[in-house]
Image (spheres, grey):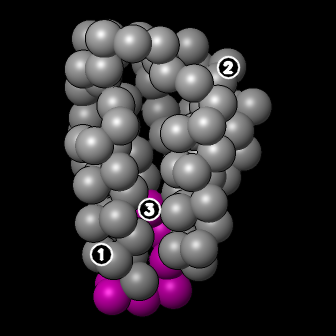
Amino acid sequence: MTDFNYIINNTNNIHARPLSDLAKIAKDSQCEVTIIKGNNSKDIKKIIGIMQLNLKVGDEVYVTIKGSDEILEQKAKENIYNFFKLNF
């Protein structure tokens, strides 16, 4: 398992389109990817779940990635983290 923390710094609202793209990246990773905000955790592959977190500027999220091997996990972490940096 691998993980990372990220603080949302997008001053615009987070819309369904980038969440859909994020879900696709997570699905393509072949890993179990969970996003946690406070006491709420959601499957990052499901857009509705992410939207229920109501992410906004200053929120800290914790992302966990579990795959069948370290190479898959690291590749997923790199892709998902880079997507967060570019979009959130």
CB under 8 Å between discs 1 and 3: no
Q: CA distance from mark 1 to mark 2?
A: 27 Å
Q: Which quadrant holds residue 61?
A: top left
Which of disc 3 and disc 1 is earlier in sequence? 3
Placement of the C terminus among the 4 image quadrants = top left
Give the labeled residue for mark 3: 65
Start and end of the magenta stretch? 65-71
Give the amino acid type for the residue marked by disc 2 in the picture: Gln
Which of disc 2 and disc 1 is earlier in sequence? 2
Give the labeled residue for mark 2: 52
Mark closer to the observer (2, 3): 2
CB under 8 Å between discs 2 and 3: no
x, y percentage for residue 24? 62, 60
CB under 8 Å between discs 1 and 2: no
Which of disc 3 and disc 2 is earlier in sequence? 2
Give the labeled residue for mark 1: 74
**Badge 2: residue crowd in 10 Å (few <14, some 14–19, many ≥20):** few
**Residue 66 on the magenta span:** yes
Residue placed at 27% from the left, 66% from the top? Answer: 78
Q: CA distance from mark 2 to mark 3?
A: 20 Å
- Side (left or right) of 18 relative to 74: right
- Side (left or right) of 40 relative to 38: right
Give the amino acid type for the residue marked by disc 1 in the picture: Gln
The number of numbered discs placed on residues in the rendered structure image is: 3
Give the amino acid type for the residue marked by disc 3 in the picture: Ile
Residue placed at 41% from the left, 83% from the top? Answer: 72
Placement of the N terminus among the 4 image quadrants = bottom left
Q: CA distance from mark 1 to mark 3?
A: 9 Å
